């Protein structure tokens, strides 16, 4: 078996285990984004939900999926370890697909609950293992996360296109069944390559603990997560409970983190405070960024022309759903290499400044979306090229923040709570999704019969405001960067 030391002493740009983990994550994201793409369409066309209810329900499911990563992270830290968590998460997701495939109309919500818990066990813990492939201070870590991020988006792109196509044009049971097949591929890939991880991600329970007792704890987690399903079902299907859940879970995690912090020394706790700064800013980032699934998708539907570069026929919703992934796949490895190149020349911006740049680019992107108003005709239709440019810019913002954030959580968290902190990082995404829906709703016109032009003016005004706020946040981050860096103590 490889030792952690041997793994971390790897030669070259990337450890080989990164590719294995990226492979499993790619297939998991295929399912996640495939499901995400199908959710609203399925709810509206098959379950007969109105647009508003479908949107709220969609927001609730997305928020729960990300919120449960926190719980998955904690159980991995305390009992299962990252590897077993991954297995359990994948099994639950496979089961979820099968449950829905059996009877999509009646079992949709129950199957979705399996997904919520499954993703919670899978998603944060695979990212944490990526971080564990590196020594503290290894400058290759951010580049590794950038490559991992490309794999995420490759899966997202393929799943986002294929699943909805199978569901809409062939069969919904088949589409949901496909989730199980693809997730099984992810699991098999992990099972076959797991050995190369050596002791990384094994159970944190003390080796001296009797085997029976270990088994008992593990089985309790498995059974406990199954028992949770009916409760989650209640929470998801009633969006008032979702609100309540969102009000409680964030403060509760902060209290829990505070409790855990008593075990660490001042240096470690300062690093944790720095991690919290990143987590809080990321909520705002995702709240803006996730307009993609909501207001931008409605904007694409109503206000954007169907030709790219003046002659290529193109559905703006296809651009809306795939441009970001395509740009990430192309540019994430290049960004990774750019950070390496800059670091060799001692020019690499530190992580706080990278976050700040992420917000400045976010601002640039929303100025782009706002600028579509200057290209609009009297019918309220505007340029797909300018719209796509917005996505091009936002991708660089995402790449300056999201893979860096994953990497930072692994650098700033002490070993015993790495899963918890990665879970908090994704919990921020849950809040981001939640706030994104509120922002999108606030931007839309109240009048359902409003003209296209009125809708365009209303959304672009909203985008203008988001651009200004993102700009201010970017500047704030860069200004406070020396203070945050002090907290980070030696972490770049
Ligand atoms: N797109 C990335 C993923 O799916 C990040 C998502 C997020 O943190 N909101 O992993």
Image (tube, rainbow, N blue to C red):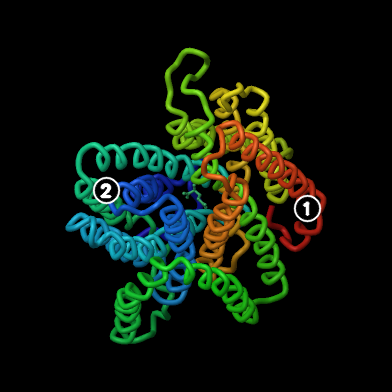
Task: Give the residue at the far top of this rendering.
Answer: 311
Left or right: 313 as drawn, with respect to 271: left
Residue at 53% x, 36% y is 299
Which image quarter holds the N terminus? bottom left
Of 323 and 100, the residue lying toward us? 100
The residue tagged with tag 2: helix, strand or loop? helix
**Are dots 2 and 1 in contact, CB under 8 Å?**
no
Q: Is mark 1 within 8 Å of ligand 1?
A: no
Residue at disc 1, secondary structure:
helix
Q: Residue 481's mark?
A: 1
The answer, for residue 407, to whether it is visible in the render is no
> Residue 374 vs residue 185: left or right?
right
- Whether the residue carrying mark 2 lies under 8 Å from ligand 1 is answered with no
Residue 218 appears at what percent x and percent y? Answer: 33, 78
Q: Position of residue 171 (x, y in %)?
A: 20, 43
Which residue in the structure is indicated by mark 2?
Answer: 182
Density class for disc 2 (Cα within 10 Å; few <14, some 14-19, many ≥20) is many
Total label count? Answer: 2
Q: Is residue 240 left or right of residue 31?
A: right
Residue at left offset 43%, top offset 62%? 200
Q: Nearer the viewer, residue 323 or 373?
A: 373
The image shows residue 137 at horizontal and vertical percentages of 63, 54
Query: Which label sits on residue 325?
Result: none
**Quadrant of res 238:** bottom left
Q: State which quadrant residue 233 falls in.
A: bottom left
Residue lying furthest left in this view? 102
Q: Nearer the viewer, mark 2 or mark 1?
A: 2
Q: Along the polypeptide, which appears first: circle 2 or circle 1? A: 2
Q: Is residue 395 visible?
A: yes
Residue 92 in the image: above or below residue 165 = below
Determine the residue positioned at 20% across, 50% down: 173
Local packing at callout 1 (Cα closer than 10 Å; few below 14, some 14-19, many 20+) is some
């Amino acid at each position: 078996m490889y030792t952690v030391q041997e793994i971390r002493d790897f030669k070259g740009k990337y450890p080989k285990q990164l590719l294995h983990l990226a492979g499993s994550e790619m297939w998991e994201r295929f399912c996640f984004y495939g499901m995400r793409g199908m959710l609203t369409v399925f709810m509206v066309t098959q379950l007969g939900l109105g647009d508003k209810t479908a949107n709220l329900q969609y927001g609730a499911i997305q928020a729960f999926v990300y919120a449960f990563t926190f719980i998955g992270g904690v159980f991995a830290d305390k009992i299962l370890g990252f590897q077993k968590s991954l297995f359990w998460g994948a099994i639950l997701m496979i089961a979820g697909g099968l449950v829905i495939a059996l009877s999509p109309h009646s079992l949709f919500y129950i199957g979705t609950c399996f997904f919520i818990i499954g993703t919670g066990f899978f998603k944060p813990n695979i990212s944490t293992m990526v971080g564990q492939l590196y020594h503290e201070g290894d400058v290759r870590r951010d580049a590794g996360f950038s490559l991992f991020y490309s794999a995420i988006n490759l899966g997202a792109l393929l799943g986002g296109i294929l699943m909805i196509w199978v569901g809409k044009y062939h069969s919904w049971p088949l589409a949901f069944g496909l989730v199980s097949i693809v997730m099984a591929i992810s699991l098999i890939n992990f099972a076959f390559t797991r050995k190369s991880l050596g002791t990384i991600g094994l159970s944190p329970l003390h080796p001296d603990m009797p085997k029976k007792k270990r088994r008992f704890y593990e089985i309790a987690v498995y059974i406990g997560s199954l028992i949770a399903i009916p409760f989650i079902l209640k929470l998801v299907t009633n969006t008032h409970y979702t609100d309540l859940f969102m009000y409680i879970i964030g403060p509760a995690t902060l209290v829990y983190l505070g409790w855990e912090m008593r075990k660490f020394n001042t240096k470690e706790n300062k690093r944790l405070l720095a991690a919290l700064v990143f987590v809080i800013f990321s909520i705002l980032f995702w709240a803006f960024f996730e307009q993609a699934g909501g207001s931008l998708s409605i904007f694409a539907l109503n206000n954007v022309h169907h030709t790219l570069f003046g002659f290529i026929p193109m559905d703006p919703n296809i651009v809306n759903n795939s441009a970001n992934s395509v740009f990430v796949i192309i540019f994430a490895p290049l960004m990774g290499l750019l950070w390496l190149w800059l670091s060799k020349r001692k020019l690499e911006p530190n992580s706080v400044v990278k976050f700040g740049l992420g917000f400045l680019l976010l601002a640039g992107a929303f100025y782009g979306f706002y600028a579509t108003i200057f290209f609009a005709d009297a019918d309220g239709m505007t340029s797909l090229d300018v719209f796509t440019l917005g996505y091009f810019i936002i991708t660089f913002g995402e790449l300056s923040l999201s893979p860096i954030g994953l990497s930072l959580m692994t650098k700033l968290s002490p070993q015993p709570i790495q899963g918890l902190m990665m879970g908090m990082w994704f919990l921020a995404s849950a809040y981001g999704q939640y706030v994104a829906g509120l922002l999108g709703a606030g931007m839309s016109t109240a009048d359902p019969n409003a003209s296209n032009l009125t809708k365009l003016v209303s959304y672009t005004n909203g985008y203008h405001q988001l651009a200004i706020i993102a700009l201010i946040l970017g500047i704030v981050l860069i200004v406070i960067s020396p203070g945050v860096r002090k907290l980070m103590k030696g972490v770049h």
